[in-house]
Image (cartoon, grey):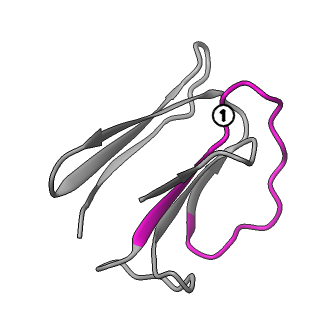
């Protein structure tokens, strides 16, 4: 899993290989979580493998890590309704 936060938005990518091709079996899931309070930036065109994007809510990404799996949950600021959650397997 890769977690970055440079962009001022939230974006989740499907598992992908290092060259950017989709790989549901052995790929790496990426999250961009730049939702810490600086102004949001509008999105351009979606990048390959982008599954979900939001630039309306500030919040945090809660990660629960286990030996063979992980779970994520985006928790928005009070008054916002955008959420995201899911799980994945570790390789």
Q: Quadrant of residue 81?
A: top right
Q: In which quarter of the image is residue 41?
A: top right
Q: On the rendered image, what quadrant is the N terminus found in?
A: bottom left
Tell me how many marks there are: 1
Q: Nearer the viewer, residue 84 or 10?
A: 10
Residue pictured at 47% horizontal, 68% vertical: 14
Q: Nearer the viewer, residue 85 or 72?
A: 72
Q: Is residue 69 left or right of residue 3?
A: left
Q: Is residue 87 left or right of residue 12?
A: left
| x and y, in percent, of residue 75 in the image | 48, 27
Q: Is residue 54 above or below residue 24?
A: above
Q: In this view, does 32 lie above or below 15?
A: above
Residue pictured at 79% horizontal, 28% vertical: 38
Q: Per the image, is 38 magenta?
A: yes
| x and y, in percent, of residue 47 in the image | 69, 71
Q: Are there few (<14), some (14-19), or many (20+) residues within 10 Å of tag 1? A: many
Q: In this view, does 36 lie above or below 90?
A: above
Which residue in the rendered view is the most extreme toward the left? 67
Q: Which of 78 and 35 is in front in this view?
A: 35
Q: In this view, does 9 lie to the left or right of 3?
A: right
| x and y, in percent, of residue 82 in the image | 57, 33
Q: Tell me which segment is drawn in magenta.
A: 28-50
Which residue in the rendered view is the most extreme toward the top? 78
Q: Main secondary structure of the magenta part?
A: loop
Q: Quadrant of residue 69?
A: bottom left
Task: Read off the residue under disc 1.
Answer: 35
Residue pictured at 23% horizontal, 70% vertical: 91
Q: Per the image, is 55 magenta?
A: no
Task: Classify mark 1: helix, strand or loop.
Answer: loop
| x and y, in percent, of residue 88 in the image | 28, 58
């Amino acid at each position: 899993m890769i977690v970055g936060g440079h962009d001022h938005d939230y974006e989740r990518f499907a598992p992908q290989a290092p060259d950017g091709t989709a790989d549901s079996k052995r790929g790496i899931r990426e999250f961009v979580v730049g939702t810490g309070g600086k102004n949001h930036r509008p999105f351009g065109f979606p990048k390959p493998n982008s599954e979900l994007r939001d630039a309306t809510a500030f919040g945090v990404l809660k990660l629960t890590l286990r030996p063979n799996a992980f779970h994520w949950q985006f928790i928005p600021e009070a008054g916002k309704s955008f959420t995201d959650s899911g799980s994945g397997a570790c390789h």
